Amino acid sequence: MNRSNAGAFDRSITSGADFLQLSVEDAPVRGLSDWLAGQLRLAISDGRLPIGSRLPATRVLAGELRVSRGVVTEAYQRLIEDGHVAGRGRAGTVVVAPIPVTAALPTAAATPIAAPPTDPTDATGPTDPTGPATADALFTAPGADVFDAMRAIPARIDLSPGMPDLGAFPRTAWLRAERSVLGALSAADFGYGDPRGTPALRLAVANWLARNRGIRADPEDVIVVAGVAQALGLIAQVLRDGGITEMAVEDPGSLGARQHLRHWRLDTPPIPVDAEGIRVDELRAQGAPAVLLTPAHQFPTGVVLAGERRRDLMRWVRVGGLIVEDDYDAEHRYDRPPVPALRSMLTEGICYAGSVSKLLAPALRLGWMLAPPKYRDALVEAKRFTDLGNAALPQLVLARLMESGDLERQLRFLRGRHRRRRDAMIAAIGAHLPGAVVHGAAAGLHVMVTFEAAGFASGGFASAGFASGRFTDADLAAEALARGVKVQPLSWHGQRPGPPGLVLGYAANTPTVTAEGIAILGDILRPRHRS
């Protein structure tokens, strides 16, 4: 074999990499960085690159693929920005977060998504065996399992509200705190504990609420719970046992919260919300003895409860009313000053609940409740007979994060990250849904958009279908899901008639993904103007 032929032979067998069997022959002529980033995402999603895997050095991989080092560096940087890999100095670039399989699919695919399989044991919602298990049924008749069903349906882009950026979980800080906690635990600490929670976390929560929410609480009054959802369940049980059969809720207000209360046999009469928050005059007129509120960032509208409404609620409490305060999204604010908790104004008659589900991750199932003295013993008893108390080790780790300042540092980091993602969503709505009205953008992890007839028509879209009822926000959500985009229709969260709209989460997606999802919504709506 002569030298020239040998050189050609060498290039043919060395222009690919052993790593993932990558070959530039499979790549498009242009967009090498896009192709490489896509291959890496796919390998992370299907398990070939599990968490902890180290990527090859950029110089090494570029040499194996016979591409410039800049191609590999750019691909790695995209995964770093997405939060799936991280540079660890001399340890290299390491996979730190999983990618759902559907999120790694090529963006050109827009395969219609089937609804979940029917479950003959549940005929109350989207899996009713008497009718087709379609996306339309999922959105127009949401059953008790609707959120589980939605999570189970694959979609390329998930704009559901309520999900934080899971890739931003502070793994290093958590592991450091966990090692420290484990090193200090005695054998006795691994036994059964106080159903209210570990003393360390109850003290840390009391200090955290004093620093960040202006609430003065005795650690003895703190009950550690498995998120706000469990807090609602415990409160509902105690109230029901005490003869209370209904808890008023904001309207629009969280479908999930209503479902939890109704599961424990509490009725949920709706009280309208306006630009100043819940209508206290309507609450009085309705006559319910208790009300569930999200005063710092009302879900889904984003309204902050106004000062006069707060004072009016305090008067309502003093004559016997009970407020359950879900301090929803209070810490996630961008363009407004802090909003004081109702519990900081009054101890009696307010049951306060919060969690780290949005600040860290919902999988931790860690939250807290401050019970009014009247209900404290009954709530502790309900917690005891529910699960004997939360797992101790995660509580102690969270306490260490709170007391060390790591949790405040995480909050500051997330505010900047979420602000950029919020801005990207608002810009995408302006570009692709002109005339749609954005609500609640100053704080939280979601925005609410409404399709007001006049404004929406002026943006070049047909509002007649919405106005006549021929095309609903549930129809829009169903069609979006068929195109690979998950959203929640505003009608899910209302018990009374209201304008059509969507509730859109932005925290869990990169700006590019969010913009693509909003563009798909615009594409769905535009043809209706031409028909």
Image (spheres, rainbow, N blue to C red):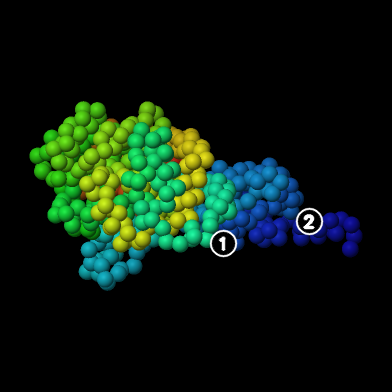
Indicate the position of residue 388 as horizontal and vertical percent values. Answer: 36, 61
Which residue, as the protein is rendered here, is positioned at the far bottom? Answer: 120
Q: In this view, does 191 lie to the left or right of 43?
A: left
Residue at left offset 60%, top offset 58% = 49
Cα gap from disc 2 to disc 1, whole angstroms = 30 Å
On residue 383, which mark appears? none
Residue at left offset 63%, top offset 51% = 94
**Corner quadrant of residue 42:** bottom right
* Vertical comparison of 385 with 62: above or below: below
Mark 1 secondary-structure assignment? loop
Question: Can the viewer see residue 483?
Answer: no
Residue type at mark 1: give it: Gly
- Which residue has dot 1 on it? 47
Indicate the position of residue 485 as horizontal and vertical percent values. Answer: 39, 51
On residue 11, which mark appears? 2
| Position of the C terminus by quadrant | top left
